Image (cartoon, grey):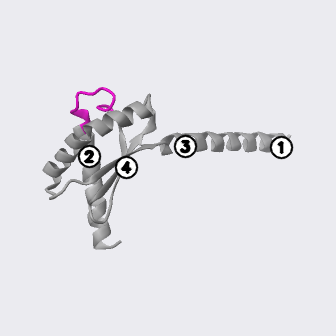
Amino acid sequence: MQKNDIIRQKQESFLQESLSIALAGLSDTRINSLTITKVEVSRGKQDVKIYLDKLGIEDPKETLHALKKARNILKEYILNVTGWYAPPKLNFIIDDSLGTQNRLDEIFKQIHQEEEKAHKDDDK
């Protein structure tokens, strides 16, 4: 892993924690309890993708609208905690990877149970 990749990874981890704290401090109940699953920072720090856990979101459209309204507050927060000269463009993405992982786990569990059942039937 190259030095630049390590630096970017540290920035992403720091931003994930910092933005979680910033969101929790907001008064809007639609967004103050969201879980950030991942943050990706572009090479030039101009764009930040913020992935939000879908499980904590009742109405994705309403949540994204609330985040859009809070975007300037979050940009200012990022500038304060990072010391960057310009705020990045924030892109909020609803992340369903946890839901997908849970569905895959259930499928694998069913396959395993069917294999065990078939193996027991073969032993008889």
The picture places residue 93, in percent across and down from the top left corner, at 41, 45
- Residue 106, relative to residue 5: is it above or below? above
Q: Residue at x 26, y 46 (%)?
A: 17
Q: Residue at 80% of width from left, 42% of height from top?
A: 118
Could you say which quadrant of the image residue 32 lies in?
A: top left
> Callout 4: 10 Å neighbours few (<14), some, many (20+)?
some
Q: What segment is highlighted magenta in the picture?
A: 23-33
Name the dominant secondary structure of the magenta segment: loop
| Amino acid on which disc 3 is placed | Thr
Element assignment for label 3: helix
Q: State yes or no: residue 26 in magenta.
A: yes
Residue 27 at what x, y percent from top left? 23, 27
The answer to whether the residues at label 3 and label 4 have Cβ atoms under 8 Å apart is no
Q: x, y percentage for residue 97? A: 49, 45
Q: Nearer the N terminus, badge 2 or badge 3? A: 2
From mark 4 to mark 2, how far is it between C-alphas?
A: 10 Å
Distance from the alpha carbon under mark 3 to that under mark 1: 35 Å
Task: Work out whether mark 2 precedes mark 1 in sequence or the reverse, and give the earlier one.
Answer: 2
* Residue picked out by circle 4: 38
The residue at which mark 3 appears reads as 100
Q: Are marks 2 and 1 in contact (CB under 8 Å)?
A: no
Q: Amino acid at mark 1?
A: Asp
Q: Which residue is mark 2?
A: 17
Q: Nearer the viewer, residue 48 or 121?
A: 48
Q: Between marks 3 and 4, how big is the CA–CA gap?
A: 15 Å
Question: For mark 2, does the 10 Å Cα neighbourhood hold few (<14), some (14 to 19), or many (20 or more) residues?
Answer: few
Q: Amino acid at mark 2?
A: Glu
Q: Position of residue 86 (x, y in %)?
A: 18, 57
Note whether 119 is above or below 10 in the view shown: above
Of labels 2 and 1, the one closer to you: 2
Q: Is 7 contained in the magenta span?
A: no
Q: Which residue is mark 1?
A: 123
